[in-house]
Amino acid sequence: MQDRYHVPVLGREISKYLVKNPHGVYLDGTLGGGGHAELLLNSLESDAHYIGIDRDAEAIEFARKRLSAFQNITFFQGTFTQMREAVRRAGFETVDAILLDLGVSSHQIDLDSRGFAFRPGVRLDMRMDREETLTAAEILNSYDEKDLRRIFRQFGEERHAGRIARRVAAERQKQPIEFSDQLMRIIDACVDSRFATKSYARIFQALRIEVNRELNELKNALSIALELLVGGGRLAVISYHSLEDREVKNFFKHQENPCTCPPELPYCVCGKKPLLKRIKPFLIRPGRDEIEQNPRARSAKLRIGEKI
Ligand SMILES: C[S@@+](CC[C@H](N)C(=O)[O-])C[C@H]1O[C@@H](n2cnc3c(N)ncnc32)[C@H](O)[C@@H]1O
């Protein structure tokens, strides 16, 4: 039952690098099906506390059942940029470790009703939190052509962003674009059939990022996470595409070396001190065995930083 929701990625590595203090407070910003939570809770002592956040009510409900044997857990439905509030609600000020396992769960992709997948008959929804109002269909039917082009280019890194945006703007005059197959046909008309699947993936990714404001969420969450961690506390982030990973990599590098003084100055005058050190290996990827057992792990990249 549990694996049908989502198989946790890099579980062994997360337990190995994140658990320094088995009595500490752990914050999981992307609880999902509770797979990482279960692994971590099993390696923590009973006086540790786990705070699980997810913006998806179905995830919280599933994880609550899965983790019902544990007493030391607080659930919080909301975005991970509300981490401070979640920590305060659990009765704490700071935490010892934070995990962000970005993106969508297998459950969200596998259920047609959630509208993330490029399978025929799927209504284009893509909201992680179904209380929100903006859906992928709404974007396709209401955004200006130039805004569609921008999100396809910026969030999908799609070469044919302009052509696809133009076609969307023309097709929606005839009929609203509501279903995956309509969008796939538009993409088919704009790209070489050999590369169509890659373009579907890029355009669907772009819409998902826009619907859920994923990159803004990530950028804000990284700074908040650093504030909440105790000295020596660790932040682990698993990303699944280059836009997310770039954000995480740059944040870690910048926090490790925030000095803005010109290199020719013999000593630092800006006074900006490092707040985080990157933990080696700087980049952890799943091994071949894990990818064979769970192909969805193949694009995962894990980076870990420790607060100074
Ligand atoms: C890859 S899954 C996490 C799977 C989880 N680690 C497990 O082992 O089951 C990502 C989860 O993060 C949630 N999520 C994504 N962005 C979020 C955000 N900004 N705030 C809160 N939850 C978010 C999604 O709803 C999804 O359930």
Image (spheres, rainbow, N blue to C red):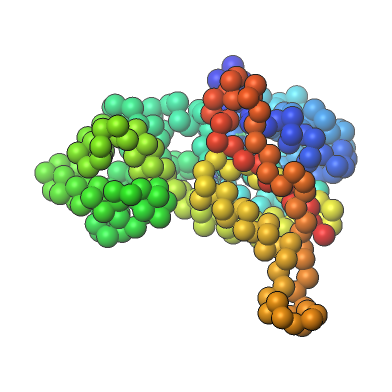
Placement of the C terminus among the 4 image quadrants? bottom right
Q: Position of residue 72 (x, y in %)?
A: 79, 36
Residue in the picture at 65% in, 31% down: 286
Nearer to the camera, 142 or 69: 142
Residue 268 relative to residue 224: left or right:
right
**One can see residue 128 in this view:** yes
Question: Could you say where residue 107 lies in the image, as x and y percent from the top left?
Answer: 50, 28
Q: Residue at x 30, y 51 (%)?
A: 161
Nearer to the camera, 203 or 125: 203
Q: In the shown orientation, is residue 261 left or right of residue 209?
A: right
Q: Position of residue 79 (x, y in %)?
A: 57, 49
Task: Report the residue that reaches farthest toward the top.
Answer: 1
Q: Residue at x 62, y 40 (%)?
A: 301
Query: In the picture shown, does residue 111 fall above or below 233?
Result: above
Question: In x, y percent, where is residue 274?
Answer: 77, 66
Residue 254 drawn above or below residue 105: below
